[in-house]
Image (cartoon, coloured by chain):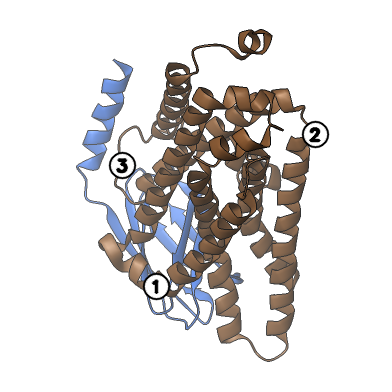
């Protein structure tokens, strides 16, 4: 019974198209360093790495670790989030920091 | 240098734990050194290869190639660990009792040695991949001088990871031989279940698995995944500070499956009776 309910909730939220948010890293800095997304909705982050070195998009609060090759683009799927600030960094160049603001 | 040390050590640490466990599990098995050595070597080569093709891998499957690849190799490791445990349940009890009876041990233990070598290779590949990429980035981008110091940090990180491996090994060996078998069987069952849960997390990140996405608990304030203890527990028992319901289900299912298979294939006579006979 419980399982059925869980499947049901998921199916309804899955019907919505996820919002795509584009972000890039250049000179080991996120551009833009602050991105916004709606709450309780799936988000797709398209992470472009414009540097000549690999980067790793990492966020503890978003539970994401994703390596993006030089000149490559990483697609990061984020499940619906509660409103708040979610910090992320480039794990390979930790001076690169950014925030996802969910409203 | 210190930042590089931390980044590399973090990756090597988990592989070190797994190699240490495999070494302890295979104590007394002939040629295990060359099996495990080739596992480590294969893992390092594989990590370099995967790092070299990181761009192509990421771009595959609509940008989720990395996650699917991770999930797939973790799946292979789960199968190998399960096979080892089931096989040992069938044939290992006698072995554990008389592990010094070298002749038999060599024949028996080496059956699943290839599987364990694959597990070692996968552990090293998975953890080494990021270390290789990080160090590659340093080499490509560094101004003269700073690169050397960072490479030095990386090397110290690898050595410390080796230390973790040695500590795990000696720690497990301090357990009496008779109990070692049950301890390592349990360790491997938890290791496999944890890997299955991690594979599930990767599939969720790739949006390949979307059912039961609810987070069951949040213990990230008490014991975050990113702390050293959190990492150790994640490797050993599959700890996660915010597991989804699906991860928990997979974890429990794999754990139950391994225990049931071990029971189903267990040798007909329990060890105690056989020892008395």
* Viewer-side label of 2, 1: 2
Residue at mark 1: B53
Sequence-wise first label, 3 or 1 = 1
Q: Nearer the viewer, residue B27 or B218?
A: B27
| Residue drawn 29% across the image and 46% down it | B208
C-alpha span from label 2 to label 1:
42 Å
> Distance from label 3 to label 1 (Cα)?
25 Å
Task: State left or right for residue B144 relative to residue B251.
Answer: right
Furthest toward the right, the residue is B174
Tell me which corner region of the image, top left, top right, bottom left or bottom right, holds residue B39: bottom right
Q: Which residue is mark 3?
A: B209
Is B253 rendered above or below residue B66?
above
Q: From what the image shows, is residue A42 above or below residue B251?
A: below
User: In percent of the image, x 43 and y 73: which residue is there?
Assistant: A69
Q: Quadrant of the N terminus of chain A?
A: top left
Mark sitting earlier along the chain (2/1): 1
| Residue B198, image x, y percentages | 47, 43
On the question of residue B226 being in view, the answer is: no
- Colour in which chain B is drawn: brown
Q: Are marks 2 and 3 in contact (CB under 8 Å)?
A: no
Mark 3 or 1, closer to the camera: 1
The chain coloured blue is A
């Amino acid at each position: 019974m419980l399982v059925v309910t869980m499947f049901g909730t998921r199916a309804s939220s899955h019907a919505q198209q996820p919002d795509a948010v584009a972000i890039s890293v250049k000179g080991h800095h996120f551009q833009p360093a602050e991105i916004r997304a709606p709450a309780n909705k799936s988000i797709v982050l398209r992470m472009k790495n414009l540097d000549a070195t690999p980067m790793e998009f990492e966020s503890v609060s978003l539970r994401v670790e994703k390596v993006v090759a030089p000149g490559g683009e990483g697609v990061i799927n984020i499940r619906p989030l509660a409103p708040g600030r979610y910090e992320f960094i480039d794990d390979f160049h930790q001076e690169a920091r950014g925030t996802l603001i969910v409203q | 240098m210190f930042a590089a040390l931390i980044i590399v050590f973090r990756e090597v640490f988990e592989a070190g734990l797994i190699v240490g466990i495999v070494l302890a599990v295979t104590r007394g098995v002939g040629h295990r050194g060359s099996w495990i050595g080739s596992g480590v070597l294969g893992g390092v080569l594989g990590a370099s290869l995967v790092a070299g093709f990181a761009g192509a891998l990421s771009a595959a499957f609509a940008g989720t190639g990395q996650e699917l690849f991770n999930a797939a190799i973790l799946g292979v490791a789960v199968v190998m660990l399960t096979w080892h445990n089931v096989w040992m349940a069938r044939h290992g009890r006698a072995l554990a009792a008389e592990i010094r009876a070298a002749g038999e041990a060599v024949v028996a233990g080496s059956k699943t040695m290839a599987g364990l070598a694959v597990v070692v290779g996968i552990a090293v590949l998975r953890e080494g991949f990021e270390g290789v990429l990080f160090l590659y980035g340093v080499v490509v981008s560094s101004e003269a001088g700073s690169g050397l110091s960072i490479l030095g940090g990386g090397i110290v990180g690898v050595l410390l990871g080796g230390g973790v491996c040695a500590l795990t090994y000696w720690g497990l060996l301090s357990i009496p031989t008779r109990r070692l078998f049950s301890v390592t069987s349990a360790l491997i069952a938890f290791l496999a279940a944890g890997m299955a849960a991690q594979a599930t997390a990767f599939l969720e990140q790739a949006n390949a698995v979307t059912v039961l996405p609810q987070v069951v608990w949040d213990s990230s304030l008490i014991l975050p995944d990113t702390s050293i203890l959190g990492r150790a527990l994640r490797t050993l028992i599959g700890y996660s500070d915010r597991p989804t319901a699906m991860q928990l289900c997979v974890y429990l299912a794999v754990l139950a499956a391994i225990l049931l298979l071990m029971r189903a294939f267990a040798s007909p006579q329990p060890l105690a009776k056989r020892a008395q006979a």
